[in-house]
Amino acid sequence: MSQTRRVRVLFVCMGNICRSPMGQGVFERFVEQAGLQERIAVDSAGTHAYHVGEPPDERAQQAAAARGYTLHEQRARQVTVEDLRSADYVLAMDRDNLAVLQELCPPELQGRIRLVTEFSELYPGRDVPDPYYGGTRGFERVLDMIEDAAQGLLQAIRRRHRL
């Protein structure tokens, strides 16, 4: 195993039971398929403590599993300032959570916080909508957006970190 520090990616939504666990699951699979799991660490958290300790929403797990992503081992947690210090990429799912992260983040680390869709080809700069109060289709749409952004993110990380 390499002694090189791993690039750390953190996906963030509000409660850490829908969008950010899906982001983590999708990106973990992409990293694994690229053979970079020793070089890139992936995690997720929420800006609020509503669901700390709970597994991802059952609908998120089902939608993800239908596409081959595993979420069942994840547990919701709230983002910390230490997360912002240790992560190279802190990726908010929408502008509301982006604002919360920017408020929490020390000024010298602000550049690490981005909207996840900044890496998207099909949905650049758009909010990933919260599917919690909607139906199954909302979870599918979220996965579509995350998959697209995750492809661009992986390409960006590979270029920037020469992986």
Image: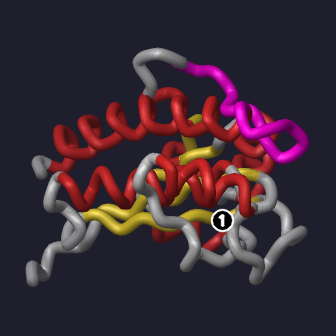
User: Which quadrant of the view contains residue 68?
Assistant: bottom left
Q: Residue at x 66, y 54 (%)?
A: 60
> Is residue 108 at least partly visible in the picture?
no
* Residue underneath mark 1: 45
User: Which quadrant of the view contains residue 18?
Assistant: bottom right
Q: Of 155 and 88, which appears nearest the observer? A: 155
For residue 106, side relative to residue 116 (left or right): right
Q: Quarter holding the N terminus?
A: bottom left
**Could you tell me residue 106's position as x and y percent?**
65, 59
Q: Is residue 143 above or below residue 83?
A: above
Dot 1 amino acid type? Ala
- Secondary structure under badge 1? strand
For residue 110, side relative to residue 5 (left or right): right
Q: Which colour scheme appears in the figure? A: secondary structure
**Could you tell me residue 115's position as x and y percent?**
59, 35
Majority secondary structure of the magenta segment? loop
Q: Of 49 and 24, which appears nearest the observer? A: 24
> Is residue 65 at least partly visible in the picture?
yes
Q: Residue at x 34, y 57 (%)?
A: 29
Q: Of 145 and 57, which appears nearest the observer? A: 57
**Could you tell me residue 17's position as x and y percent?**
73, 62
**Could you tell me residue 86's position as x and y percent?**
47, 70
User: Which quadrant of the view contains residue 98?
Assistant: top right
Q: Of 32 and 42, which appears nearest the observer? A: 32
Q: Residues within 10 Å of mark 1 (few under 14, many from 20)?
A: many
Q: Residue at x 52, y 31 (%)?
A: 144
**Membership of 120 in magenta stretch:** no
Q: Residue at x 13, y 82 (%)?
A: 3
Q: Which residues are magenta?
A: 124-137
